[in-house]
Image (tube, rainbow, N blue to C red):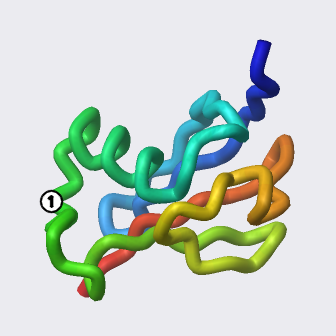
Amino acid sequence: MKEKIIVVFSIPKLNEEFDIEIPLGISANELIYGLNRGLNLGIRLNDPSDCYLRSENPVALLRGDTTLEEYKLHQGSKIIYSRG
């Protein structure tokens, strides 16, 4: 079974934070697609300048085919969606 972690997902514009469980074996693009579809974030997936998320602990720009494990995300990492 693939390893999963629980991270904090933050939307500062709405002043919302909640925990989500995600598998480490998926790519940043797969995470972005899933969150965009599930939460109706409005990310333009065909626009590379809009198709990213930020993380804290570790600090990273999540995008592309790099897996979340390669970004060294771990329990308690924070993923942030902020635009404009």
Position of 17 with respect to 77 (left or right) is left
Q: Quadrant of residue 59?
A: bottom right
| Percent of width and height locating residue 38 | 27, 33
Left/right of residue 47 with respect to residue 39 in the rendered view: left
| Quadrant (top left/top right/bottom left/bottom right) for the N terminus | top right
Given residues 31 and 15, the one toward you in this image is: 31
Q: Residues within 10 Å of mark 1 (few under 14, many from 20)?
A: few
| Tag 1 residue | 42
Quarter assignment of residue 82: bottom left
Q: Position of residue 48 (x, y in %)?
A: 28, 81
- Please identify the residue farthest to the top as the structure is shown: 1
Q: For mark 1, give the secondary structure.
A: loop
Residue at (66%, 32%) from the top-left corner? 23
- For the residue pair 13 and 50, the one nearer the viewer reads as 50
Q: Residue sitting at 28 percent across and 87 percent down?
A: 49
Please report the residue visible at 24 percent of the width from the left and 87 percent of the height from the top.
84
Q: Is residue 42 left or right of residue 79?
A: left
Residue lying at 84% horizontally and 42% vertically, measured from the top left: 75
Q: Amino acid at mark 1?
A: Gly
Left/right placement of residue 38 relative to residue 82 reads left
